[in-house]
Image (cartoon, helix red, strand yellow):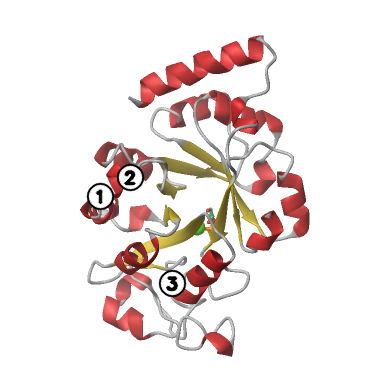
Amino acid sequence: MKVMKNVFFTALATVISFFGIKKMTSTTHKMKRIGHRGAAGYCPENTFPSYDRAIEMGADYLEIDVQLSKDGKIVVIHDSLVDRTTDHKGKVSDFTFDELRKMDAGSWFSQKFRGACIPSFAEVLDKYADRVGLLIELKKPALYPGIEKMIAEELKKRNFHTKGDDHIIVQSFETESMKRFHELVPEIPVAILINYPPDTVEIKNIAKYASYLNPKWTVVNKRVIDLIHSNGMKAIAWTVRSRKEAEKLKHYPLDGIVADYLDLIE
Ligand code: G3P
Ligand code: CA
C-alpha cells in the first residue's frame, strides 16, 4: 500500500514540478503545532502538568518519549536514566513501575511542581488521546526488545489503528524499530527522526515504510523539505526553543513543528 502511495506521489510531484505549480503541501495543509514533551519550556517534561499546559496552549499534538520499566510497563520519560528528571539515580529499566511512580519528577524543574509523577503510557493514552494527537517517540528501542509490539497492542486495544487522520504517529531515530512497527500496524503512520542532511537514496529507502521524515531544525532547508514531500512523506521539524529557530522554520512548508514553547510558533 505504501509502495503504491509512493509511486502516486512521485508521479504527482513530477507533474507539479513540470507545470511549475507550487506544491500543494505548501498551500493547503495545516501545520501541526506539537508540544515537546508537553510544554517542556514551562513545566517539567513528560508529566501531566506539562501535557495539560500544552493543551491549554492549543497544541494539536503532544510529543512523548517512552521506555520500559523493570516489570515491563511502558513509561513516559525521555532519558534511559532517571537522574536528570527525578530525585533518584539509576536506569529506568532497573525500577518497577511502582518504584518509578513514587519518584518526584517535578522538583528538578521547580518546587512549584514538586510531586509530579512519571506517567504510564496507558495513562497518557486514556487521559489525552481523545483530545489531542500524539507523537510517540520510541527512545532507544534496541534496549527494549519487543517494545514495538507492546506499543502496537496498547494502541490497537483502544482502536487507534482505525482512527486515521494521523491522529497517532510513532517515531524513532532507529529505522529497524520503525520498520518493525510498520509491519505490525501499517495503519498507524511511522516517522524517522534525522539530525543530519539525508541523501536521496536514504530518503527513498525510508519512504518505503515511513509516512514522515522528521528533521532537526538545523537540517531544514528547501532541498530537504522538497525531497521529503516529493517522496510522498510529510516533514515535522524539531525542536523549537527560541524565536530565532521559529523565525527560520516559518519560511518552509512544514507539516508540523515540535516546540518547547508553543507560543513561539503561533
Ligand atoms: O520530536 C523529536 C524530538 O523530541 C527528538 O529529540 O531528544 O527531544 O527526544 P529529543
Ligand atoms: Ca522526543
Which of these two is toward me, 126 or 238? 126
Q: Residue 144 appears in which quarter of the rendering?
A: bottom left
The reply to whether callout 3 and callout 2 are in contact (CB within 8 Å) is no
Spatial CA distance of label 3 from label 2 is: 34 Å
Image coordinates of residue 35 in percent, x first then y, are 55, 60
Q: Neighbour class for label 2 at 10 Å: few (<14), some, many (≥20)? A: few
Is 142 placed left or right of 215 in the picture? left
Q: Which residue has dot 3 on it?
A: 81
Closer to the camera: disc 3 or disc 2?
2
Question: Residue 163 has which mark?
Answer: 2
User: Which residue type does callout 2 highlight?
Assistant: Lys
Residue at 72% x, 52% y: name it.
246
Location of the N terminus by quadrant is top left
Q: Neighbour class for label 3 at 10 Å: few (<14), some, many (≥20)? A: some
Residue at 62% x, 40% y: name it.
254
Location of the C terminus by quadrant is bottom right
Q: Which residue has dot 1 on it?
A: 159
Q: Residue 175 appears in which quarter of the rendering?
A: top left
User: Which residue type does callout 1 highlight?
Assistant: Asn
Sooner in the amino-acid sequence: mark 3 or mark 2: 3
Q: In this rendering, does residue 107 appear at all?
A: no
User: Which residue type does callout 3 highlight?
Assistant: Leu
The reply to whether callout 2 and callout 1 are in contact (CB within 8 Å) is yes
